[in-house]
Image (spheres, rainbow, N blue to C red):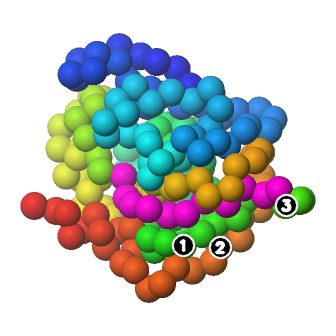
Amino acid sequence: MHSLRGDDGSVGITAIDKRAATGAVTVRTLGLFADVQADRAHHGGLDKAVYAYAQEDADYWEGELGRALPPGWFGENFRIEGVDVSGSRVGDRWTIGGGAHPVVVEVTMPRQPCETFARWVGGRDARGWVKRFTVAGRPGAYLRVISTGKVSAGDSIRTSLGSGSPTIADILAGNRG
């Protein structure tokens, strides 16, 4: 589920305000059914169809920020527990769900924090957020959809490793300027 909000950035709106969905959600080549990507130049497309964030990383930020950060707060489509999302490697594939037609996604790149994200964080924490988020090395990962289908909260995730590419966190660290 999503919610568009006004934003002071160049697009004028943001869809970072994601919320947990109930029931099965259809995953298509360009993302989740009914999801919105307000700034498709920077979010969305085949290589950024889905954004995943680890619950363990969200727990870290809850401690840092001193507030609850429910699923969707980072703008993620999937809040995942038990998978080191930022430690994943480009090319890793995740099979989500079971049955005859599980969803298969492929790790493509880290999320690059932006000023829209900083405004979303808000308050005192907004100042310096882009650098702070980057330095923490917990960016989450964008995913390409290989096989479409439906997913539900609590579905199992099986990972198969890519070809020894750098981790998502390593790529983000290399982008620090």
Label 3 vs label 1: CA separation? 18 Å
Q: Position of residue 8 (x, y in %)?
A: 23, 18
In the displayed structure, 110 sits above or below 67; it is below
- Judging depth in this view, the residue of 174 and 26 nearest the camera is 26
Q: Which residue is mark 2?
A: 159
Q: Residue at x 54, y 41 (%)?
A: 30
Where the N terminus falls, by quadrant? top right
Q: Residue at x 52, y 55 (%)?
A: 144
Label 3 vs label 2: CA separation? 13 Å
Checking the image for residue 92, the label placed there is 1
Q: Residue at x 24, y 68 (%)?
A: 173
Q: Is residue 130 magenta?
A: no
- Judging depth in this view, the residue of 120 and 44 nearest the camera is 44
Q: Earlier in the sequence, mark 3 or mark 1?
A: 1
Q: Position of residue 54 (x, y in %)?
A: 54, 58
Q: Secondary structure at mark 1?
A: loop
Residue projecting furthest to the right: 99
Q: Looking at the picture, which amino acid does disc 1 mark?
A: Asp
Q: Position of residue 141 (x, y in %)?
A: 45, 58
Are there few (<14), some (14-19), or many (20+) residues within 10 Å of tag 3? few
Q: Looking at the picture, which amino acid does disc 2 mark?
A: Thr
Indicate left or right for 9 with 94 as reference.
Answer: left
Q: Label 2 near label 1: C-beta < 8 Å?
A: yes
Task: Give the residues in magenta.
Answer: 101-111
Checking the image for residue 98, the label placed there is 3
Checking the image for residue 141, the label placed there is none
Q: Residue at x 62, y 26 (%)?
A: 34
Res. 77 in view: no
Are there few (<14), some (14-19), or many (20+) residues within 10 Å of tag 1? some
Mainly helix, strand or loop, the magenta region?
strand
